[in-house]
Structures are given as structure tokens and as C-alpha cells.
Amino acid sequence: MSTRVGQEGEDAAAAYLASLGYRIVARNVRFRAGEIDLVAEDGGVLVFVEVKTRRGRGFGSPAEAVTAEKRRRLVRLASLYLARRGGPVPPCRFDVVSVEPGPDGRYRCEVIKGAFGA
């Protein structure tokens, strides 16, 4: 997948989450160990969001691409983010947003709230 498609998918995911009432706190938070796609707040909960964009279902749904190793890495990255942020640790959760192109050429998004635990 091209970087452009990935970025467009992430943009679509951020807009979709905002339309659901999430407040986007940060995008593309980078650490040596990897990157958190989106950090958002949803009703007082700090949400670490993994965005998966696919052009089609030839390799399964986008959410299926969030492997056990990817989940473990995101949990480690969230710990690093919280340590960098400092202060009291708020309630947190991990969401996955699946992004696919629709028949009209616009991206369709689906959020899985609490997709996995720490």
C-alpha cells in the first residue's frame, strides 16, 4: 500500500472519530519502538487508536491485520506515551479503525471500541 493511501486512510479515520465526538489529541506519535497512529479522548477516556487501511479484502479485513505482536507493540507504545505525558494516568483503551474505499471512492470507516486490552 502506498504511503498516500495510508495517510488518506488515517485522515479519514481522524475525521470519522471526530464526527463521533472523539477529540484528536495527537497524530503519528513516534518512538524508537514504533508509532501510535492516533491518540484521542472519548468521554474522559484516553484512546490509543490503530488505523488499518486496505484497498480490498484480498488479505482479509483491515482489523484482521492487527496481529498479536502489533497489539503488544501498541501497549508498549501507550506506556511510553503515558510516561512522556506525565501526571496521573487516566482511564485508557485501545480502539482499531478499519478504513476501506467505498464504491463512491470515499473511504468507509468502522471503529472497534476496546478492540483489545493492555
Image (cartoon, helix red, strand yellow):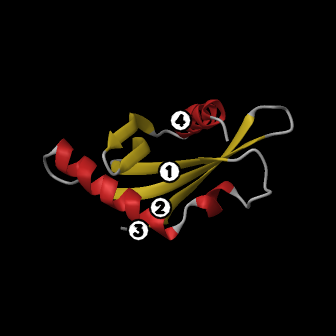
Helix, strand or loop at mark 3: loop
Vertical arrangement, residue 65 with respect to residue 4, above or below = below
Q: Nearer the viewer, residue 100 or 24?
A: 100
- Label 3: which residue? 117
Q: In the rendered structure, are the residues bearing label 1 and label 4 in contact, judged by CB atoms less than 8 Å apart?
A: no
For residue 28, which quarter of the picture? Answer: top left
Q: Marks 4/2: CA distance? A: 20 Å
Q: Give how far apart the Cα atoms at labels 4 and 3 are.
A: 21 Å
Precedes in sequence: disc 1 or disc 4: 4
In the image, what residue type sits under mark 3?
Answer: Gly
The residue shown at (54%, 40%) is 17
Q: Is residue 99 left or right of residue 34?
A: right
Whether residues under marks 4 and 2 lie with C-beta atoms below 8 angstroms apart, the answer is: no
Residue 26 vertical placement versus 114 (above, below):
above
Q: Residues within 10 Å of mark 3 (few under 14, many from 20)?
A: few
Q: CA distance from mark 1 to mark 2?
A: 9 Å
- Residue 50 lies left or right of residue 80; in this view the side is right
Amino acid type assigned to the residue bearing label 4 in the image? Ala
Which residue is nearer to you in this view: 63 or 108? 63
- Residue 7 position, x and y percent, is 58, 32
According to the image, label 1 marks what residue?
Answer: 50
Residue 102 location, quadrant: top right
C-alpha gap between disc 1 and disc 3:
13 Å
Q: Residue at the left extreme?
A: 87
Which of pointers 1 and 4 indicates the residue nearer the eye? 1
- Dot 2 corresponds to which residue? 70
Q: Which of disc 3 and disc 1 is earlier in sequence?
A: 1
Q: Which residue is mark 4?
A: 14
Image quadrant where one finds the C terminus: bottom left
Residue 41 % position (x, y): 38, 43
Q: Are marks 4 and 3 in contact (CB under 8 Å)?
A: no
Marked residue nearer the N-terminal end (1 or 2): 1
